[in-house]
Amino acid sequence: MSDEVERIKAVYRRRMDLDLSKRYSPFSPGELYTLQRREQAIVHLLRRAGITDLAALRVLEVGCGRGRPLADWTRWGASARNLHGIDIMEPFIRQAVDLLPRATLVVGSANRLPFPDRSFDIVAQLTMFTSILDRAMRRAAAAEMQRVLAPAGAILWYDFRYPSPFNRDVRPVRLREIRALFPDWRIDSVTTTLLPPLARRLARISFGACAFLESALPPLRSHHLALLTRPG
């Protein structure tokens, strides 16, 4: 798996060299639309599961990047002291520390999480698994997420369900694979997020039109959003 870790690092170093982060600026209408809709969908899913008081919950994001999605949890009521993040890219973690100085943020890999068993009430991953092409590493990462999750905890999952025709460095995770990675778990899953190329174009004209297409045409939703809990 060390080869896969080095491959992923090389991919993100290339992305840094190309300064692709500007594509994901909230000042881009398409990105702002996507971020707002993702937040709505996540909060709705948590509420449906009865998870509405986050103040005392310990949250880990695996593949936290620069920390922006992890920071969302404070707006939803979580304490920054209870937030934890891990990413294989040290430059990303340095930026995350600047954003969330009270959180616990470490450099490391998803297949070897440096946390004790049953440490977290919520373990989240947002578009991290699609960056892992090696099936063995995917299984190891899923096993580690299960290991560090408290018995009554939940895994929040958000990732691509379609392949990217322009990016060979990612591979989608379909619902059947999520079920295979977490056998016998309860999975509350929805499809969400208007196809990014379409959202980038249409959001410049109308957020309402984006929302209509996303709601009316399920095949245009590019991601699975799911909350996973243990059986029993």
Image: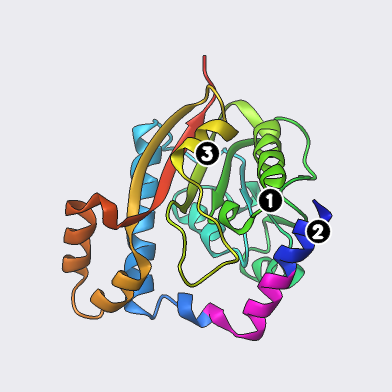
Query: Which residue is rendered at x = 65% and y = 32% of the image?
Result: 146
Say if mark 1 contacts mark 2, CB within 8 Å. yes
Q: Examine the image and state in which quarter residue 101 appears.
A: bottom right
User: Does residue 119 show up?
Assistant: no
Across and down, in percent, residue 122 comes to 57, 39
Residue labelled with disc 2: 3
| Residue type, mark 3 in image | Glu
Residue labelled with disc 1: 134
User: Most prominent secondary structure in the magenta stretch?
Assistant: helix
Q: Is residue 144 left or right of residue 164?
A: right
Q: Examine the image and state in which quarter residue 104 appears.
A: bottom right
**The residue stretch that appears in magenta:** 10-21
Say if mark 1 contacts mark 3, CB within 8 Å. no
| Pointer 2 or 3: first along the chain | 2
In three-dimensional space, the C-alpha distance between marks 1 and 3, rounded to whole angstroms, equals 13 Å
Q: Is residue 96 left or right of residue 51?
A: right
User: Does residue 135 show up?
Assistant: yes
Across and down, in percent, residue 143 comes to 69, 35
Q: Is residue 74 left or right of residue 4?
A: left
SS at circle 1: loop
| Pointer 1 or 3: first along the chain | 1
**Front-lying residue, 102 or 187:** 187
Say if mark 2 contacts mark 3, CB within 8 Å. no
| Pointer 1 or 2: first along the chain | 2
- Outermost residue on the top side: it is 232
In three-dimensional space, the C-alpha distance between marks 1 and 2, rounded to whole angstroms, equals 10 Å
Residue labelled with disc 3: 177
**Front-lying residue, 24 or 84:** 24
SS at circle 3: helix
